[in-house]
Image: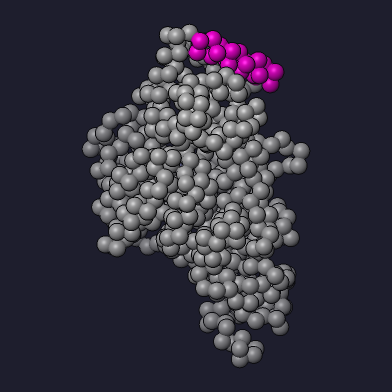
Amino acid sequence: MTPQRRILLGTLASLAFVSAACATGAEDFDLLIENGRVVDGTGSPGIYADVGITDDSIVAIGDLASRTARKTIDAEGLIVSPGFIDIHAHPERGFREAGASANLNYLIQGVTTVLTGNDGGGTFRVAETKTNWEALGIGTNAAHLVGFGAVREEVLGVEARAPTPDELARMRSLVRQAMQEGAWGMSSGLEYVPGRYASTEEIIEVARVVGEFGGIYSSHQRNEFDGTMEATRETIRIAEEAGVRGNSTHLKIARKNNWGAMQELIELINAARARGVDVGADLYPYHFASGGPILPIASNDGWAPFHLPGDMEPFAQLRQALSDRSLPDSERRALRSRYVDELARALSDEAKREQIRRSVLVGTPDRPSSVALAGWDSYLVVVAEKNADLVGRILSDIAAEQNRDPFDVAADLVIDEPDLYVACGVMSEADMGLAMGQDWVMLSSDGDARPVVNESDAPVISHPRSFGSQARVLARYVKERQVLTLEEAIRRMTSLPARFLRMEDRGLLASGYKADIAVFDPDNTRDIATHANARQYSTGTHFVVVNGKLAIEEGQYTGLLNGELLTPDRGAPN
Ligand SMILES: [Zn+2]
């Protein structure tokens, strides 16, 4: 060993190396990544170094040219970084399906750990979930948050009332169970049923249990439109009073009339941080939120604007018929086109049109109006065939230009092109860049695990974030717009979320850390997915290592399912 190398290798690495060498026989390492530029996740400038891996851990970083390995990767011209940790994702459904559980749309971007259970939906049955996911096999690691909404629903159903003291105790005990079984904290989705029915005080009481375990509280806040400031104040208060680290998740201020308010929001969070409240945020790198067809026929629900009165006929009946999953495609098409024809008729009847207008603009207690919440200036047309000239435009702007009421414009569009796809939540990219510039903002996706895509698969209209978030950070916000340096972007996707979670053995490239590693070409990393064709893999990643094993090799998926549902290594609650 040269003196130089002796300096580079820490004591821990040397010890680990000795024991590993015994285990694997003649070779020094199981895997050696040579000649890459190592960007270690701390935010420090990259250095040229080799990375030695044995079993599931990094055991050496430095000049390892004279060392041997069972397998060697040449990373010349490439960046070697910690695998990305996505603090807000929704792969739960995919993790239950063979074919999707590989989470390839994330792996191929260098993501090695995704947070699950977000937006209040995470199960409290963490041990059972771990067993099930690992039995099927998952491609990336996961770290789970118990959902406040899931717990509330278990105890109170979806009732819009406060819990009794007994019910509150039961909610707390379910959260305790989840934390004991390995949750990293609790999520909430306060814009959704049933989270929206909970008072701040109720959430604080439940979150205190999370605080006992040193967990996080990550909130899809009560409002992401006009009430974002107030909603963020609530997150700060919960963090402060419950003694948890708080996260304003997928931070945004949607709706055109709110653009420019990000500075004020950042100041609010910075002020809380300055007085010692551990509160942060994550965001996904798109200035439009998820959406759907302007006329949500199948569900008459969700974020799309044009919700009909729930009991209006023949629509209720037609939806019922459409809910039959065994329906042949031809019949489905026929039913849908009848739905649109009937709607055209209803809209030309004065009384019915008023009823529909009311449903769209006001909603009902069980189906809140997304227009009332978001405003017409939140709807961005993202996919349209017949009305291609409207793509990239906001519904309220289209109406203003035509000097017409936005409802009337939407009603015409619904009939003309019911599949016209709108993002429900349009943000200012300048606001987003401002948030991205804060050193406490983590970068996430809010996407899900999708089945492996075959070349013959038809394009799917959806938000591109499941396939493109991490690559887009590197391509658009590092390379193109230079909002972040490469080192800083990597830090926000690795050590920052790991430290926020108190995940002690991931998020950095250092001896003793778990070998979750991404090797990519920063000049060719690119998000390809678009709304119109959302299932397209990002490019630029050459190798991905998950728990010491190669999941992506020369840009191709190896078929490996080496992920685990990670659980915190903590002693007894304090
Ligand atoms: Zn959310």
Predominant SS of the magenta segment:
helix
Question: Could you tell me residue 241's position as x and y percent?
Answer: 25, 52
Rendered view: 352 above or below 382: above
From the viewer's perspective, is 432 left or right of 243?
right
Question: Could you tell me residue 140's position as x and y percent?
Answer: 59, 53
Q: Quadrant of the N terminus?
A: bottom right
Q: Residue extending furthest left?
A: 165
Residue 545 lies within the magenta run: no
Question: Could you tell me residue 115's position as x and y percent?
Answer: 49, 51
Q: What is the total number of numbered labels drawn onto the structure image?
A: 0
From the viewer's perspective, is 571 left or right of 478?
left
Q: Quadrant of the C terminus?
A: bottom left
Q: 29 or 89, which lies in front?
A: 89
Residue 561 seen: no
Name the residue located 27 percent from the left edge and 54 percent from the top edge: 240
Question: Could you tell me residue 33's position as x and y percent?
Answer: 67, 71
Q: 114 or 253, which lies in front?
A: 253
Residue 345 lies within the magenta run: yes
What range of the chain is rendered magenta?
Answer: 327-348
Name the residue located 64 percent from the left edge and 21 percent from the top edge: 326
Q: Residue extending furthest bottom?
A: 3
Q: 561 or 243, which lies in front?
A: 243
Name the residue located 31 percent from the left edge and 29 percent from the top edge: 160
Where is residue 52, by image quadrant? bottom right
Rendered view: 168 above or below 434: above
